Every structure is written in C-alpha cells, then in structure tokens.
Image: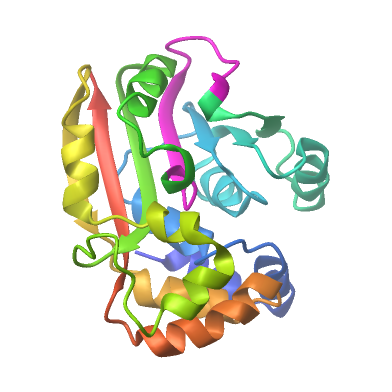
C-alpha cells in the first residue's frame, strides 16, 4: 500500500525534504493509503484542500499524474510554488490561497476529487461545511478526507496524561479531535452525497512516528504527548463520499 512512500523515504535527500515540510503526521503516507481506495489517473483534476507544504500534492502528482490545485490558508502559494518547482511538479501542481470558511474561488463541478489530509478537522466541524464543498466536485466524483481524532468518545474530557499538551496548544485544539462515529453522523446530515467509506487508517501509528522525527518545533513538542498517549487514544480517520 505504501510503495511510493517507502521508496521515497529510502533516499536521504528525499527523507530530509519530507521531514522539513511536514506539518503533522506523515501526509505522504496518509495520502498514499487514502488514494489506494480511489481510482486516480492522469486525466483527473484534484483539489488538495489544506495542502500545507504540498506533500499530499506531490504524492498525487508523482504517483498518479493527476493535475492538482493545491489550496491552503496558512502556507503562501508563492512558497509552495517554489517547492513545486524544486521537485519538478510545477507543471501539474497549482498553488492557491483559499479559506474554505469564506467560500472557494473555483467553478462548480470542476474537480473529479476533493482530497484533504490533516486539515478538515480545523474548519469542517459544522453542518454547513460539507454542503458548501459538494458543488465543486462533479457528479460521480469523490470527496476523500483524512483527519486525526479519538479512538473512543472523550465527551470533551481530555485524558489527564494529555491535558498538559492540549492546554499548551489551546483549548480549540482538543475540540478539533472527534471520533469516527461523530464524523459519520455529521456527514449523514448532508444531501447530495453517498457515503462510501468511514474507516480507521492502518498507517496511524507509523504516520505519527514519522512526524516525531521532523525538526518542526511542533513535532518536537508532540514527542512528549505521544509518549504519554502510548497508542491508546489517537486515531486517523478516512472519510469518503461520492457526489450524486
């Protein structure tokens, strides 16, 4: 399932690039697992929403040849353009600045797939967000999202051993984590889609471990949190729906 990611990480220069551009659990590995459940090809247009520094975009372009619009709120499109040029994907990866909560600047029905890794939990927890995104995907296309979350319902009560880390990050960070069932119940409220799959991702532990090897200051801070967590609480959730 992870042939591209594993091979990519065998090269020391690639591994450094990957670690330097991580913003959370290994987005390349998560993207490869997500994409294995979709039929992506070079003729498809993909919206990579919340692309960060473009690791998910790179996977979609280099493995599948897709044409990817790489949209992010926090990362400069100019910075991403320079990254895309440096790895030779600037002919198929197009960076833009976008805020999903304020409306996206794209034509309705334009994309074959809306793809999002480790971003949707920040802005997608309201009942009106998914309906606002559905029109941008053509009929028969897919919305595929991966988010970190809880394995079991915490009822807004962070486990005692994790409280120091969430308090440091801010209360909002704890609220972004939800369970698989919570997300499924939210998505069931939306018309215009058929839910295809809700699943716990197999790469959860490995993607988190690879993030902890990043020099990113947030990864360094997360090392204590993950040691305290011991695989008991955190999850990675994949959500896939087909547009009707």
Please state the horizontal and vertical placement of residue 49, each as a whole percent of the image: 53, 36
Q: Residue at x 50, y 66 (%)?
A: 25
Q: From the viewer's perspective, tell me whether residue 239 is left or right of residue 217.
A: left
Q: From the viewer's perspective, tell me whether residue 168 is left or right of residue 172.
A: right
Q: Specify the quadrant that holds the N terminus.
A: bottom left
Occupied quadrant, residue 127: top left
Q: Residue at x 60, y 82 (%)?
A: 213
Question: Where 13 sits versus 76, above or below?
Answer: below
Residue placed most toward the observer, 77 or 121: 121
Q: Specify the quadrant that holds the C terminus.
A: top left
Please state the horizontal and vertical placement of residue 14, each as a whole percent of the image: 69, 70
Name the image colouring: rainbow
Was residue 196 drawn as part of the magenta stretch in this picture?
Answer: no
Please state the horizontal and vertical placement of residue 225, each as a whole percent of the image: 48, 82
- Residue at the far top: name it: 108
Q: Residue at x 56, y 15 (%)?
A: 106
| Residue stretch in magenta | 102-120
Residue placed most toward the observer, 93 or 238: 238
Was residue 115 drawn as part of the magenta stretch in this picture?
Answer: yes
Occupied quadrant, residue 216: bottom right
Q: Residue at x 48, y 45 (%)?
A: 122
Please state the horizontal and vertical placement of residue 152, each as a whole percent of the image: 19, 66
């Amino acid at each position: 399932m992870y042939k591209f990611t594993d091979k990519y990480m065998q090269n020391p220069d690639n591994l450094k690039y990957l670690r330097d551009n991580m913003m959370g659990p290994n987005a390349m590995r998560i993207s490869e697992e997500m994409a294995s459940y979709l039929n992506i090809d070079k003729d498809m247009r993909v919206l990579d929403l919340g692309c960060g520094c473009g690791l998910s975009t790179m996977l979609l372009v280099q493995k599948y040849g897709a044409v990817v619009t790489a949209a992010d709120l926090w990362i400069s499109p100019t910075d991403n353009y320079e990254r895309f040029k440096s790895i030779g994907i600037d002919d198929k990866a197009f960076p833009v600045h976008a805020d999903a909560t304020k409306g996206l600047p794209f034509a309705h029905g334009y994309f074959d797939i809306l793809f999002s890794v480790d971003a949707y939990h920040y802005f997608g927890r309201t009942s009106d967000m998914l309906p606002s995104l559905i029109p941008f995907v053509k009929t028969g296309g897919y919305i595929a999202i991966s988010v970190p979350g809880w394995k079991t319902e915490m009822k807004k009560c962070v486990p005692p051993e994790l409280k120091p880390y969430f308090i440091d990050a801010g209360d909002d960070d704890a609220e972004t984590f939800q369970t698989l069932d919570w997300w499924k119940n939210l998505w069931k409220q939306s018309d215009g889609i058929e839910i295809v799959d809700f699943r716990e991702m197999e790469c959860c532990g490995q993607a988190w471990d690879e993030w902890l090897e990043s020099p990113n200051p947030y990864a360094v801070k997360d090392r204590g949190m993950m040691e305290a967590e011991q695989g008991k609480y955190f999850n990675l959730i994949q959500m896939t729906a087909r547009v009707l």
